[in-house]
Image: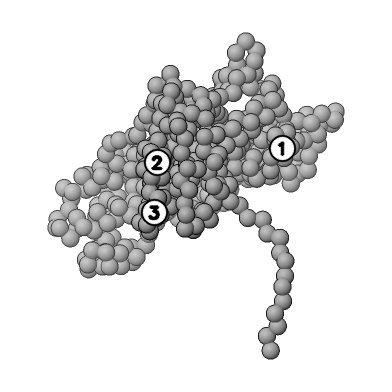
Amino acid sequence: MLKQSLNQKLLQKLSPQQIQFIKLLELNTLNFEQKIEEELIDNPALEQGSEDEGTDSSEFDEYNDGYESMKDESIDVSDYLSDDDGGVQLNDQYSGGGDEEKEFIPINAGITFRERLIEAVKPSLQTEQEYILADQIIGTLDDDGYLRRPLRSIVNDLLFSANVRTTEEELEAVLEKIQDLEPAGIAARSLQECLLLQIRSKAKVKNTAITKLAETVIADHMEDFTKKHYSRLIKKLNVTEDFLKEAITYISKLNPKPAGSSSSGKETDFIIPDFIVKEEYGELRVELNGRNTPALKVSPSYLETLKGYEKSKKPDKSTKDAVQFIKQKLDSAKWFVDSVKQRQNTLLVTMRAIVEIQRDYFLTGEEENLKPMILKDIAERVHMDVSTISRVASSKYVETDFGIFLLKHFFSEGIVTASGEEVSNKEVKKILAEAIASEDKQKPLTDGKLQIVLKEKGYNIARRTVAKYREQLNIPVARLRKELA
């Protein structure tokens, strides 16, 4: 027998406007501009407007909350009417001012490296079938120039997508023609093959004992080479240390990413700062970069349309549907404008709090003046949730007098020195990087020795912390930093 029961639950749910605000807050300037463009296309009740057209958004405070009123049989459109044009626009502090010229984001245009390869390989192709295979292989290359998809998978790709039957042997023959192209090493399937292709290409021009030794090292002793087991190589190859060093120097000049300097077909990433912090007469001025953000307002024409429906004494179903549609669009436009203003205000408040804490750094640009600061510090200062500050700090850039930095650059954990002073771990990482840069490469410093170096400078941290900072700096362990004399 079924039992019925009544339970009460307390749930926290975000309103549609809160969700919209959170999504906008995560966007950087470029994505934010794209979102505005999309919203202007999707919602005809939202328009761009010049500064003198806008009015205060309080005109729309008479809107009914939600959409429940749409279900009523009698719809009072007077709630949406006012004597003014109903414009709502961002203030100067949010829109970036009307006197500045709008700047357009440049896009890198030109022939891609794949297109260049297709043109270069054409003369060596014999049939239409080979051209199709070459086009498929080149189109499958990664942006760094490697062919990481197995040939057997490309055989299946051609069969299912282009109804072209081929074999791995035919693909291999065409691949060899592509690998003969410049830059040397293109279309390699591994780092080992990439280096061998470059060595053999250079050997065609000038083949010496060094190139032969380099080819042997890469072809037959790749593992020992990558792990820097030089003593094993000397013994196995029966060569002197100086001779091996010359071969290793030769190999180190090869390019592990043959397409790294070529255009990969992607648009070039241009950093657009979200904030601008400038020093003026000893004071720091914080601005939002709103040069490409248009002024927004709710469409006056939609309000005028509602005025026309007001004259209907007994609205029929089509009239009610039309009023409901207009209400949805007007509410959506108002919500979007309010969310944009809330986003801009949150960004400004957060950035100003960061500048207050890191004032010495923004005035001098010196890394040692960067104070320890975590998300919680800013959240407590501006009375917001840590998750909100995290969204602000995500993928945002700051333009300063000393360059453009990721906002996350200013956040770091603190370390207490021997004197009791709390400093940023960025300062410790800087000392660590300098110590490794100046070490004897024949006897590189281990993490234990690096710990001693830091301790002598007043930073008493554990060896595992040293290893963590070294890894964050993308510096390999001591054995892999070792070089021959």
Which amino acid type is shown beneath numbered disc 2?
Lys
The answer to whether one can see residue 214 in this image is: no
Question: Which residue is the site of mark 2?
Answer: 307
- The alpha-carbon separation of the residues under discs 1 and 2 comes to 43 Å
- The alpha-carbon separation of the residues under discs 2 and 3 comes to 13 Å
- Classify mark 2: residues with Cα within 10 Å, few (<14), some (14-19) or many (20+): some
Q: Earlier in the sequence, mark 2 or mark 3?
A: 2
Who's the residue at 48% across and 45% down the image?
331
Which amino acid type is shown beneath numbered disc 1?
His
The kind of secondary structure element at disc 1 is loop
Which amino acid type is shown beneath numbered disc 3?
Pro
Q: Indicate whether 211 appears above or below 51.
A: below
Residue 383, numbered label = 1
Q: Indicate whether 82 appears above or below 131.
A: above
Who's the residue at 33% across and 66% down the image?
152
Could you tell me if the residues under marks 3 and 1 are in contact, i.e. CB atoms within 8 Å? no
| Residue placed furthest toward the left | 127
- Classify mark 1: residues with Cα within 10 Å, few (<14), some (14-19) or many (20+): few
Q: Earlier in the sequence, mark 1 or mark 2?
A: 2
Who's the residue at 59% across and 42% down the image?
391
